[in-house]
Amino acid sequence: MYKVNEIFHSLQGEGYNTGTASVFIRLSGCNLHCSFCDTRHEEGTLMSLPEIVEQVMRYPTAPLIVLTGGEPSLWIDEDFVAGLKKMTGKRIAIETNGTRPLPHGIDWVTLSPKTGLGNSGDLSVVLTRCDELKVVYLGQDLTQYDHITASHRYLQPCWVDDEEQCRRNMQDTAQAVLLHPEWRLSLQTHRILGIK
């Protein structure tokens, strides 16, 4: 059984797969407690893999499943990933904070470490390879991510409710990308579009 917060169909709003029609499986809970977390992932319903697949297949044309949270690695294992791929025929992506090893078989790994932000506890990142490194930028030293091998590197402004602070965060992130061109800018386009 897997504790699922929600399953929904939308466009991927961030990073490399921005604009891709996706089915999001938001799993409950996280092992970090970041003050800027923008998701309410604590609640959930225990579901079997066939129940999850049934919900996912309500959206047969979406080519991608995104495992997200909270921290999805708290729940998934190789049997889950293999079963989900076999029963849906879809590619599997994951968004993880990187503090736990991942099972084999995931097609796309987005690593979003929360280290260096002063509020995520003392759990260190154990993943050192990913398809996409997506860092929420709050002015932290970017050299702390140099040891991570990634095909793509993104800086994403931290979204906050205060419009003026949000604007400053976007400007600071754009400036950081100008100074560090090995990174690219990622915006939360789902917020801009007003979709989930």
Image (cartoon, grey):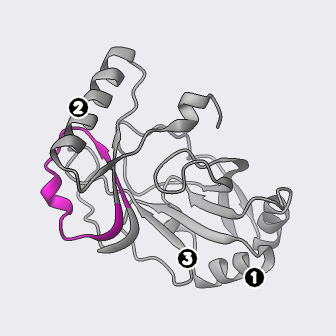
Please name the residue shown 53% across and 64% down the image: 94
Q: CA distance from mark 3 to mark 2?
A: 33 Å
Label 1 SS: helix
Please name the residue shown 27% across and 62% down the image: 123
Residue numbers of the magenta segment:
133-152
**Residue 106's disc number:** 3
The kind of residue tagged 1 is: Lys
Which image quarter holds the N terminus? Answer: bottom right
> In the drawing, does residue 186 fall left or right of residue 69?
left
8 to 56, vertically: above or below: above
| Residue 100, image x, y percentages | 39, 71
Looking at marks 1 and 2 on the same chain, the residue that comes earlier in the sequence is marked by 1
Label 2 SS: helix
Report if residue 153 lies within the magenta region.
no
Q: CA distance from mark 1 to mark 3?
A: 12 Å
Reading the image, the residue beneath label 1 is: 86
The kind of residue tagged 3 is: Ile
Looking at marks 1 and 3 on the same chain, the residue that comes earlier in the sequence is marked by 1
Reading the image, the residue beneath label 2 is: 172
